Image (cartoon, helix red, strand yellow):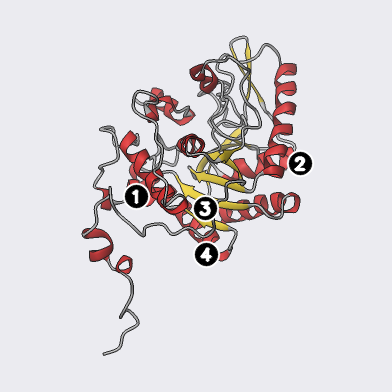
Amino acid sequence: MRSPYSGLPQKAFWRSGVSEQHPLTITNLYNKKFVIGEQDKIATAGSCFAQHIARHLTLNGYSVIDAEPPLPGLPPDRATAYGYSMYSARYGNIYTVRQLKQLTQEAFGMFKPKNTIWKKDDAYFDALRPAVEPNGLRSPGEIIQHRALHLKRVRQVFRSANIFIFTLGLTEAWIHRSSGTCYPTAPGVIAGEYSEQDYAFVNFTAAEILEDFLQFWRIVRVRNPGIRFILTVSPVPLTATASEQHVLSATVYSKSVLRSVAGELASRFRQIDYFPSYELIASHFSRGLFYEPNLRAVSGAGVREVMRLFFSEHQPTKPAVHTTAIEAPELAELSCEEVLLEAFAG
């Protein structure tokens, strides 16, 4: 009998594509949509897991944009602590697509965020990237000056990048009620003070995230028509949720929504590819092999497998270069504001 399933490749069937495969050797999980050339300039951004991607791309000889580099002589651990060289500009972690859209709008003069300076003790913080100055700055004027320079670098990133790699991290966020300004972390976690009158919790839907990304995409493509995108979804579960759901249910909701949006974008547009780091790390196929005992932190082995899968498509004839546990304890050196929420656990 003829069937539309006759003759499909092994990857189309669960037994041959998954249960008979091993997470360390699985093939055909990712087939690139386009080639990353040696001359391509790559920009990176996203949630904290995305920091691994920038590091490994650089190690493997790709041209990764660093438009806001540290001062010469600053030790690497100090540079990371101050938000340098984590991504292509010093924007810190961008957990939501709304954040990404508003940053781009602000950089090109299309949006003016409100309530962007938070205070802690005698120090002032940029509320839109509060972790990049761990001790804060001395005055609101310094915040304004630093941000103006930062936005100049952001414009440079989007105008010069051939490929933009973005890791979607969260659907949950906190916004300023009157202006809609979206923050990477809640007020009162790093700096600032929470008040129900000024701030609201949001849990973005798939439709909202899709529309946010399309608006961001249009802004960038007007200024850089040839830019291409690679999307990933962070496999790191939520540290905490303000959704009133159990954190496990909230995590599954968040990642499902993000994966749905990424998949729709990749299926609709030839300029957008999706890389399945989430599937490799977080699916039951991997049996939790790539998580640390806390079931949240991705192990060094997990990061290496993600990058092996990526480079097996983009550099199939060249052995991938990885950091070692001594050179980089992988997750330990990431800068993640979300982890700070652990301090509020009862």
Q: In this rendering, would 106 be left or right of 122?
A: right
Residue 272 seen in this snapshot: yes
- Asked which secondary structure carries label 3, the reply is loop
| Location of mark 4 (residue) | 267
Badge 1 amino acid: Leu
Task: Determine which quarter of the picture holds residue 20.
Answer: bottom left
| Location of mark 3 (residue) | 205
| Location of mark 2 (residue) | 108
Q: Residue furthest bottom?
A: 1
- Asked which secondary structure carries label 4, the reply is helix
Task: Determine which quarter of the picture holds residue 134.
Answer: top right
Q: Which mark is residue 280?
A: 1
- Asked which secondary structure carries label 2, the reply is loop
Badge 3 amino acid: Thr
Badge 4 amino acid: Ser
Question: How far across and how far down the image is residue 106, in percent?
Answer: 72, 38
N-term mark: 1 or 2: 2
Along the line of sight, the residue nearer the viewer: 287 or 196:
287
Question: How far across and how far down the image is residue 87, in percent?
Answer: 56, 34
Question: Which of the two discs, 1 and 2, sits closer to the camera?
Answer: 1
Along the line of sight, the residue nearer the viewer: 317 or 300:
317
